[in-house]
Image: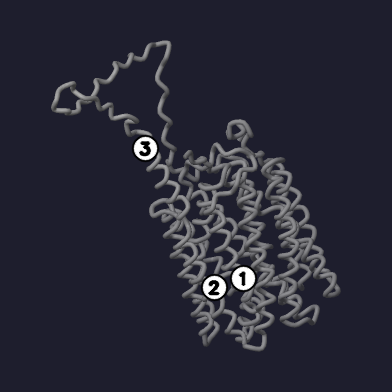
Amino acid sequence: MTRTRPDTAAPGAKLPADIWVLVSAAFIVAIGYGIIAPVLPQFAESFGLGVTAATIVVSSFAFFRLISAPAGGRLVNRLGERPVYVTGLLIVATSTFGVALAQSYWQLLLFRALGGLGSTMFTVSAMALIIRLAPPTARARAAGRYATAFLLGNIAGPVVGGLMAGWGMRVPFLVYAAALVAAAAVVYFRLGRNERLLAAEQAAQDQDDHEPADRGLVTDGGDTGTAAEAPAAPQPAPSAAEPTAPAEPAPDRSVMRFREAWRDSAYRAALVSGAAHGWTSMGIRVAIYPLFALHVLGAGAGVSGLALTVFALGNTVAVAAVGRWADRLGRRPFILTGLLIMGVSTIALGFSGSVAVFFVLSAIAGIGAGLLNPSQQAVVADVVGPHRAGGVVLSRYQMAMDTGAIFGPIIAGLLAESLGYSAAFAVSGAAVLLAFGAWLSGRETLPSREDGSQPAQR
């Protein structure tokens, strides 16, 4: 039995089973996160410290992700992906349980912030696993499936959270903590199982291939009937005209340093667009959207949850299409289109005059994010490649997104309180359009179909 290596898989190859384990765990995590996302800003605001204080709670999670990202990347390189992934999930579960029991704003801030430590661990581990396991011609598809699982969870989560509205604002956090424990169990017991079975089967096959096919037993010709091994036929020595086939080289698991990745124009552009994505899709979407619906549109928590749901729906529609096509047509066209759509729609969101318009623009912004995110993740995967240990490079990309997710809500919150929500959305959209400008000089990274090589120009 021959195992298909990720770097030699044909275009359209079947995704490895372990990718689907990651997808399942992502869905479990996301549905729990979707439950708490509409509640968290309002829960923080219930302690009576204003909009900026509420957005700081959202940013604190990203801040701790940021400061722990370098250590998370080194842990992945040193300990491996699976143990770091499981430990990270359990840390977030513990901190979320603490959020549910918080009796003051500062307790809420502390427990939510500590969850960022674990979040970095399982996020960087998941990215490293996708790079290692997915074929080069299916990286965007693998990233798309993983993102889709999060999106479907984010769609279902607010709906489930809405059904819990009468149970109080603490119950959703308890549900989320339980979901994280379940996801950790899925990863611990299932991740790598298929790979281990294949390895054992391959080892057994190799042992059979190396055993002699015939023991060559013959009678010695006497009455005793004893057996003797027939002498082996002499083997001709290999001639110069018939050289022996070289052994397949072992994969290069050397560490890719950040300076090496930084020299790549695509990686530099991905850092900028990652920060913009963190600002809008991960930051103000959670921190500002619900408060805008509450204070400007006069809607309740249920409408806030639906706004996140329609964003996720738009995101899902785009991700379903972009995953496969970005592996065929290239990453860059979808990144540029996604940034343009997301930037313009984010600016327009601040001028929404009704819930219906707010929902439509949220869906359009979600489409832009869906075109962007799997494509830029595939770019980072292309830069690192399947045979390099890229934990630090991945963690720097994660830090770029977290930087946007930290400062985006804080800046937007300050602008909302001083100049109004229109200014907050306008500045956020402008940050996305700046990333669009950065990608105009970023290279295409899609490996060639024939040999999986990278384009030479960097």
The figure's colour scheme reads one colour
Marks 1/3 in contact by CB < 8 Å: the verdict is no
Report the residue at 49% width, 72% height from top. Answer: 181
Please name the residue that numbered disc 2 is placed on.
Answer: 179
In the rendered view of the protein, which quadrant contains the C terminus? Answer: top right
Furthest-left residue in this view: 224
Pointers 1 and 2 in contact (CB under 8 A)?
yes
Q: Nearer the viewer, mark 2 or mark 3?
A: 3
Residue holding disc 1: 31
Alpha-carbon distance for marks 1 and 2?
A: 8 Å
Q: Residue at x 57, y 62 (%)?
A: 24
Point out residue 187 in the picture as x, y percentages from the top left corner: 48, 62
Mark 1 surroundings: few (<14), some (14-19) or many (≥20) residues within 10 A: many
Secondary structure beneath label 2: helix
Residue toward you, 87 or 445: 87
Give the amino acid at mark 1: Ile
Residue drawn at the location 24% of the way across and 20% of the way down: 231
What residue did someone put label 3 on?
Answer: 208
Q: In x, y percent, where is residue 60?
A: 55, 70
Q: Nearer the viewer, residue 137 or 241?
A: 241
Q: Position of residue 79 (x, y in %)?
A: 39, 55
Specify few, some or many for label 3: CA neighbours under 10 Å numbering under 14, 14-19, or 20 or more: few
Q: Of the residues shown, which amino acid type is indicated by label 2?
A: Ala
Question: Comparing marks 1 and 3, which lies closer to the viewer?
Answer: 3
Residue 417 sits in which quadrant?
bottom right
Residue 68 seen from this side: no
Q: Amino acid at mark 3?
A: Asp
Give the Cα separation between the discs numbered 1 and 3. 47 Å
